[in-house]
Image (cartoon, rainbow, N blue to C red):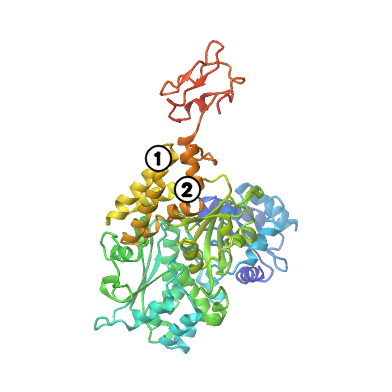
Amino acid sequence: MEAVEEQGQAVAAKQGQIKITVCLSLSGIAEGGQGVYDEFQKQISEMEANATLGERKCEMGQVGCRGYCSRDVLVDVYVPGEPRVTYEKVKPAMVKNILNDHIVGGKVFKKAASKEDYYTTLEKQTRVALEHGGAIDPESIDEYIKVGGYESLKKVLTTMKSDEVIAEIKKSGLRGKGGGGFVTANKWEKAAKAPTDEKGTRYIMVNGDEGNPASYMDRSVMEGNPHQVIEGLLIGAYAIGATEGIIYTRSDYAIAVRRLNLALEQARERGFLGDKIMGTDFSINFRVHEGLEAFIGGESTALMQSVEGKRPFPKAQPPHSCDSGLWGKPTVLNNAETWATVPKIIKNGADWYAGMGNENAQGCKVWAISGNIKYNGLMELDMKTTFQEAIDDYCGGIQKKKPLKVVHVGGVTGGFLPPEKANTPTDYESLLEAGVLMGQASFAAYDDSACVIDLAKFSIGFNEGETCGKCTPCRIGLTLIRAKLDDISEGRGKMEDLDKLQALCEEISQTSLCGLGETAPKAILTGLKYFRKEYERHIVDQICDAARCTGLYRYYVKEEDCVACGACIKPCPTGAITGGTRKVAAHIDMDLCINCNACYQACGFLAIE
């Protein structure tokens, strides 16, 4: 917490000047952040004109994402000599009160001020890629430089050889943070030694594509501090002898695209990019490539096909990209979070990073966390952190103090863990041992209001729609899985379907061409492993205890509440309702009912349940 305050005060700059910053990440803007920012500027201008502020000066600024997206719009107020105050869920109508109470009156506007537990959870995190999130202006290279930006690049270019850089990254234990967990230095080393053309062409790339609807770590890193990603990419380019760099991201990441292009322009102007960087013999240029908004676009080989102007179809490996990647040349591809971690390792040393995590995986990882918890958003956690610790210590626990039912790990290509597995550490090997994958590092914690079959249907349905269709197991297999899940959730399921699902999922996982087909069945396999009784209850008892599977709804009329008004009869499309007129209570024939919910909506007396 103190480090964040110091960064904010550092960029607040001038002696005696008050600094007010507004979160203008995507989530902040979506919640009305731009309107809040504009209102602050308007009110401050009026107060200065009226001399309400006296001799005090207020400086406005924007910041990127710090992770607590569910609390946006977040506003920080830095008053010299006082601790930072964060306001949450700020609306334009609150701005005048914040200025009058806090700036003029010297008292915190309590209605919107964040509570102490918010500060505590932020302080506990191990923030590396997100270290400056919410503290500096992502569109200002000067603010990045003030917090030590590009010092690691200077250290590398002036004091280290390329193989020494790779050795330092290897010693740190850094692994790719895109889900696969490949040892980063191994990829760099192979690419640096791989044979290429007479020009020595090698490519270095950022994978900034996230198709998983629950994951947005790379977007937030690129939006919140694009220079940190660029600095990491420059260090990697020097290490492998790259001749060109490409930042690949989705075209719908409009804010990230704009800020990345602005950051590249600023870096060129300051001599951090282009010819003879920092006066050395090292030269390279980067560009941003906007890809399609497709889930498969984030798969490494499909991504490179897209850059080459081809349809983003995955290709079988080997050869791997570090030997033959973009246009057949050695290529290193890491995600934005991995690149943003590199400058911190160079700055603080390999031992510092290796000191986090456990034997399986050193360091930390940003997780996108959601579900029935108090704090939703991004948390950067030490690898040895368990899901239970993350839920209780960082996310404020399950809402309304309900018991945990299921942890959905890895998003739409992930799986389900029961409460007894909640003490699983969040490193790669521990997750594999439990039967799930890190994937794009998201997890959702649910209470008993969630249905595992319903969650699985969403995951499979999403992947079915996003499959590229190149390989048969994925193209046809996911449709077959979804059909079986529909049967189970709509009352047509049979016990033998469970064994068929198990066999089908295992076959698809083993025979699919790329990671989508390999991992999509995890939702079913882990569901059958840990929540088989819930599947059986849907089939045998025809009941969804969470009331999520509408196909298993059973409608009935409470005769004592029915006034026989007949309002439920007309909207019923199958004639399943008899009675309901002439003082005779309505009756629903469930053999004819199709669970359309029309009668329930039509009843104004709450007689239908």
Q: What residue did someone put label 1 on? A: 487
SS state under label 2 = helix
Closer to the camera, 460 or 382?
460
Quadrant of the frame with the N terminus:
bottom right
Name which residue type carries label 2: Leu
- How much space separates mark 2 and mark 1, taking CA atoms? 15 Å
Q: Quadrant of residue 15?
A: bottom right
Q: Quadrant of residue 487?
A: top left
Name which of mark 2 and mark 1 comes first in the sequence: 2
Closer to the camera, 194 or 89?
194
Mark 2 vs mark 1: in front: 1
Q: Residues within 10 Å of mark 1 (few under 14, many from 20)?
A: some
Which residue is found at the position 30% from the left and 50% from the top?
476
Closer to the camera, 490 or 87?
490
Which residue is found at the position 51% from the left and 38% from the top?
543
Name which residue type carries label 1: Asp
On the image, the x and y values in percent for residue 64 come to 53, 62
On the image, the x and y values in percent for residue 337 come to 47, 68
Residue 271 in sight in this render: no
Quadrant of the frame with the C terminus:
top right
- Identify whether 92 is placed above or below 80: above
Q: What residue did someone put label 2 on? A: 455
Residue 195 in sight in this render: yes
On the image, the x and y values in percent for residue 85 come to 68, 60
